[in-house]
Amino acid sequence: MPERLTHLDEHGDARMVDVAGKAVTERRAVARAVVRMAPETARMVQAGDAPKGDVLATARIAGIMAAKRTGELIPLCHPIGLDHVDVDATVDAEAGTVTIIASAGVTARTGVEMEAMTAAAVAALTVYDMVKGVERGVAVEEVVLLEKSGGRSGTWRR
């Protein structure tokens, strides 16, 4: 546990962390989001039969676009030139879930956890948006960091 939050200065005011002294390293992060719905809705998503079109393809593109804009969406987050973003979605129709796995990579002085989590979250919200006309009870149940690597703290896995 850090002694203090890194986005606060000595007076407790919010600030952007100065990463100038950090080493440029290869950094990677993987996040997951889970969207829960009725099995019938999940089967529709899996079959590509949603009224608004291909839910999974749209969610994938939305997640990638969101990762690229994370520095604009999250206050104090460094804007970075991503080397890689991938968003994959799988449907378990019987369980009524769409699971989104987003990964991001960069060679930089700061990590890509927020980019991976933003990609997963926005992809999940896109799934919700694409099926809300069919089912109102859809829920984004989880957005979580699964792993990160690179930088001073090394590798971490949930």
Image: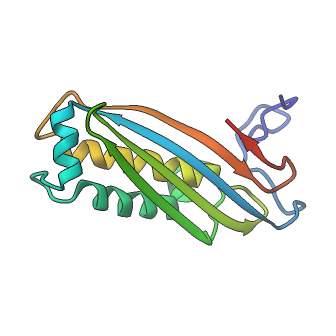
> Splitting the image into 4 quarters, where does residue 146 fall?
top right
Quadrant for the N terminus, please: top right
Is residue 139 visible in this depiction of the protein? Answer: yes
Depth order, front residue of 109/140: 140
Q: How many marks?
A: 0
Query: Residue 97: percent from the left, percent from the top?
Result: 33, 36
Depth order, front residue of 136/36: 36
Residue at 76% across, 37% down: 8
Tell me: residue 80, above or below residue 35.
below
Asked whether, in this view, residue 145 is left or right of residue 47, the answer is right
Residue most extreme to the front: 94
Colouring of the image: rainbow
Tell me: residue 47, above or below residue 99.
below
Query: Residue 142: percent from the left, percent from the top?
Result: 46, 32
Asked whether, in this view, residue 138 is left or right of residue 90, the answer is left
Asked whether, in this view, residue 157 is left or right of residue 120, the answer is right
Residue at 30% across, 55% down: 56
Is residue 77 visible in this depiction of the protein? Answer: no
Residue at 11% across, 39% down: 134
> Splitting the image into 4 quarters, where does residue 88 fall?
bottom left
Quadrant for the C terminus, please: top right
